[in-house]
């Protein structure tokens, strides 16, 4: 079952319905419709902004849904993307779509209003710095404990999953921070904060992916411009990523 916000009465058929703000079981994406037209945008549960709002600001449920709405861009028709679809129930929306034969996803460079994202910068930066200053077990530490016989295979796998989950959340916060910084400053600021020393070259790829979300610029374009600013193993790894991605393997 998908989670729902407060029950709402449809302005068209007058039936009550519950707006969805989580995907159905087995799915990782759900639609957010425009309040005026039938355009919709896909919201992935792994979208870095959504993850960062949950992790850095502690939002969930209806509070998270409302925060997401505040950060979304306007629809091309000047409507607002809302979880309640402008008080139109799913059945009525489907009927409208059938009538106008319109089921398209919103085609825009980014679904996020970066200017509004910037208002979150103090909290995002505070959370990011807090984690950078916290000494937490690394994958190397976990492997060493396993090889030394301090933990068994089951504990090792549990620890591995904990590290993956923790870093997934941390990187989402860093990606939102990068979106706020913009393509001109994000990579240089990442170097100043020693993010590559902590996460390796993959953090540069994650930053490029975030900038693609916020600006529409392609990951390969961003990394190709940036790669010569790095040297040694980091440059080699980024060049390998570019070559393999561009080559489609």
Image (cartoon, helix red, strand yellow):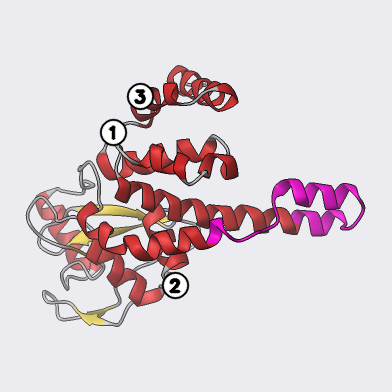
Figure quadrant of residue 218: top left
At a point 65% along the width and 59% down the height, the residue shown is: 135
Q: In screen coordinates, is 215 left or right of 243? A: left
- Position of residue 22 measured from the top left corner of the image (x, y, whole percent): 40, 66
Kindly identify which residue carries mark 1.
Answer: 217
Residue most extreme to the left:
77
> Foreground residue, 157 or 132?
132
Circles 2, 1 touching at the beta carbon (< 8 Å): no
Q: Residue at x 89, y 57 (%)?
A: 150
Q: Distance of mark 2 from mark 3, alpha carbons?
A: 35 Å
Looking at the rendered structure, the secondary structure element under dot 2 is loop
Residue 210 picture location, percent across and down: 37, 44
Of marks 1 and 3, the one in the foreground: 3
Q: In this picture, is 185 found above or below 99?
A: above
Write the start and end of the magenta stretch as one range: 131-157
Compared with residue 171, is residue 209 higher up or lower down, i.e. above or below? Answer: above
Residue wearing tag 2: 58
Q: Position of residue 242 (x, y in %)?
A: 46, 22
Q: Distance between the residues labelled 1 and 3?
A: 11 Å
Corner quadrant of residue 223: top left
Mark 2 or mark 3: name the one nearer the start of the chain: 2
């Amino acid at each position: 079952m998908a989670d729902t916000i407060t029950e709402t009465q449809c302005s068209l058929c007058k039936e009550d319905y519950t707006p969805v703000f989580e995907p159905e079981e087995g799915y990782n994406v759900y639609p957010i419709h425009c309040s005026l037209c039938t355009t919709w945008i896909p919201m992935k549960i792994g979208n870095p902004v959504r993850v960062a709002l949950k992790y850095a600001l502690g939002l969930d449920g209806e509070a998270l849904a409302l925060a997401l709405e505040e950060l979304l861009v306007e629809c091309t028709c000047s409507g607002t993307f809302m979880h309640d679809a402008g008080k139109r129930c799913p059945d009525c929306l489907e009927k409208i779509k059938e009538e106008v034969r319109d089921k398209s996803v919103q085609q825009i460079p980014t679904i996020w209003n970066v200017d509004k994202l910037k208002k979150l910068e103090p909290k995002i930066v505070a959370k990011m710095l807090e984690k950078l200053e916290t000494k937490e077990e690394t994958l190397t530490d976990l492997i060493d404990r396993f090889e030394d016989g301090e933990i068994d295979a089951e504990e090792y796998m549990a620890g591995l999953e904990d590290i993956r989950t923790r870093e997934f959340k941390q990187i989402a916060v860093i990606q939102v921070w990068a979106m706020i910084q913009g393509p001109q400053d994000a990579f240089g600021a990442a170097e100043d904060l020693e993010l590559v020393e902590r996460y390796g070259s993959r953090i540069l790829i994650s930053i490029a992916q975030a900038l693609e979300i916020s600006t529409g610029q392609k990951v390969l374009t961003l990394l190709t411009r940036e790669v010569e600013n790095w040297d040694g193993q980091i440059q080699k790894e980024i060049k390998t990523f570019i070559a393999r991605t561009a080559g489609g393997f």
